[in-house]
Image (cartoon, rainbow, N blue to C red):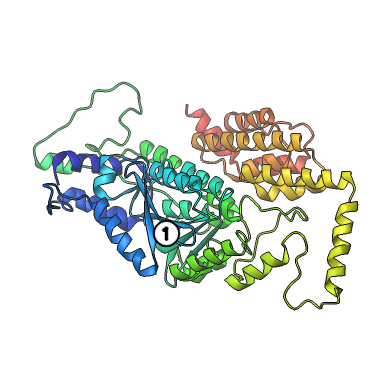
Amino acid sequence: MNTTLCARLAGSISGQVLAMEPEALRVAANAIGLRLGIEARHDDGEGRSPSILERTRAAYRQRLAMIGPTEAVEVGEGVGEYALTVDGVAIVPVLGTLVARWDWLAAWCGLTSYDALTATIGAAIDDPRVRGIMLDIDSPGGIAAGMLDCADRIRAASEVKPLWAHANALAASAACGIGTAPTRLSLPRMGNVGSVGVVSLHVDQSAADEQRGLRYTALYSGAQKIDGWGHAPLPDDVRARFQARLDASRLQFATAVAGYRGLAVDTVMQTEAALLQDYEAVNLGLADAVESFDEALAALTASLSAGGSAGITRRGPAATSQKEVTMGKTPDTRQHASADDDKDECEDETEGGDQEAGTDEDGGDGDDDEDAAEEDENEGDDVKAARGEAAAIAKACAAAGKPQLAAGFISKGVPLATVKKRLGSHATIRKLVADAMLANPNIKATVADALIEAGASVAEAKSALFNAIVTGQAPAIRGVAPEKKRAALGGIDTRAVYGAYNKR
C-alpha cells in the first residue's frame, strides 16, 4: 500500500465517529498499520490494474446471474450501479464499508458511499422500467456522518416506489441505519442486524515516538484545538468530551432507527448496540421476516404484481388508505404474512369492490359492495374533509419521524396548521436538549419527551434547560401541571449541576 493511500485510509478511521462493527474496525486498523491489503496488481490486458470496485461489481453480476436474468444499469459514469430484473425490480447493492462521499479511494477500494447510494436509488426512482427497489445489504457499517441523511432520503424514496431491504447476511451499525429506512427489512437464518451504536478510535503513539527518539511539540491556539492528538495520551477532560459526543450521536442514531421501525427509542437504546440474529431481530422489531434473498425478492415481485406494497405494515411514516386511518399502534413483528397472504389482502382492499373468485352469481356479496359504495357516495362533505385532514396529519407526523403522535392529534381534533407548528417546535426542542446534553451529561434524553408531552413551547424549553444547567431551579412553564414539570426535569441531578457550575 503506498504512503498516500495509507495516510488517506488512516485519516478516515482515526478520530472519526464510526457506526461500524468493532471487529471490522480492528481489521481495517491492522491493515493500515501493517500496510497490507492491495499491493498485488493484476493487469487487465490494457496496462492497468482493475480496482477492487470493478472486481466486486463483476463478481456481483455473476452472483445475480444465478438468480435470473438481469440488466446492469450504470449510474453517473460508474459512480453506482443497479441490476434490473425482468419483473422491474432494481437490486441495489450496499456492500462493504460505508463512507460519506464518493472519491478515488472509494472507487479503488470498493467502498459504498452514501452519496453514490443516494444517486443510485434516485436513478432507479426515475427509471420508468423500475417498479420496485430491493437493497441487497452486506456491510459492517462505516462512517457515521452522512448516514442519517442518506437513510432519510431512502425513506422518502420508499414513498414513491416500493423499497425493501434484505440483510444478506449482515446489516450492522450504519448499515442497520440504512436497512431500517425502507418499508421492509428481512434477513436469512443466522443473519445479523443491529449494532445501533458508535465508536471512535484514538491511537496513542507517544510510547512508539519515545522508542524512536521522537518528541512532538504542538503549537496551537484554542484550548480544544488538538483534542485527540495522537502523539500524547488522551487527557481525562478530552475523553469526557469525546464520550459526550459519542453518547449524543448514539441517541440520534437510535432515535432515527426507532422512528423508521415504529419502536420506542428506549427499546433501541436498551439493545446496547448489540448485534441481533435472525428471529431475535424480528421479535424485537428491527426486522420483519427471516427469509433468503431469493424469497425476499420473490415476495417483493409478488407484491408488485398484486398492486404495490401489499400486506406490508409501514413503520415510521405510516400508510393510510382512503377509507381508514389507523395510527399509534406498534405492529407485532412476530407475525408476518406470506406473499400469498399479501396478495389476498391487497385484493380485498382494492377499490371498486371487485368480486372474489367463487362469489355466487346471484349477487349476494355484490349487494354488500353496492351498499358500501352507496354509503361512500352519500358520505357528507364534513366527513370527507375530516378524513382528508386526518390523512394530512398522519403524513405530517410521518415526515417529522413521529408517526405515533398522529393518533393523539387526530383524536383531539388539533388543526393541521397547529400540528405542523408543534412538530416543528418538537424538532427544535429535541435539538436543544441534545445540545444541553453535551454541556451537561446529567441532562437525559427523556427530558425532551417530557417537555414535549407537557406542551412546552420552544421559548419555555430554552428557559427550562437554561435554568436547569445554570441554577438547578425548575422554571414555571405556563399551563403545565406541577407533576409534569417535575417529570420534565426529573432526570437532572441539580446538585451535580451546581457543582459543575461552581467550578467554572
**Residue 100 vertical position relative to residue 50 in the rendered view, above or below:** above
Q: State the residue position of label 1.
A: 136
Q: Residue furthest left?
A: 213
Q: Decide if residue 376 is on the left or right side of residue 14.
A: right
Q: Residue furthest top?
A: 221
Asked whether 230 or 414 is in front, the reply is 414
Identify the residue at horizontal 57%, vertical 32% (top origin): 469
Q: Residue furthest front?
A: 361
Q: Position of residue 68 (x, y in %)?
A: 39, 67
Q: Position of residue 390 (x, y in %)?
A: 77, 46
**Residue 480 vertical position relative to residue 326 in the rendered view, above or below:** above
Secondary element type, mark 1: strand
Asked whether 30 or 348 is in front, the reply is 348
Q: Decide if residue 81 is on the left or right side of residue 423.
A: left
Image quadrant in which you'd find residue 115: top left
Asked whether 368 or 148 is in front, the reply is 368
Identify the residue at horizontal 59%, vertical 50% (top origin): 259
Q: Decide if residue 479 is on the left or right side of residue 289.
A: right
In the rendered image, is residue 154 in sight?
A: yes
Inspect the image, locate mark 1, and give the three-letter code of the amino acid beneath it: Asp
Image quadrant in which you'd find residue 332: bottom right
Identify the residue at horizontal 18%, vertical 53% (top origin): 37
In the rendered image, is residue 141 in sight?
A: no
Q: Position of residue 354 (x, y in %)?
A: 75, 66
Q: Position of residue 136 (x, y in %)?
A: 42, 59
- Give the total of numbered labels: 1
Identify the residue at horizontal 70%, vertical 53% (top origin): 320
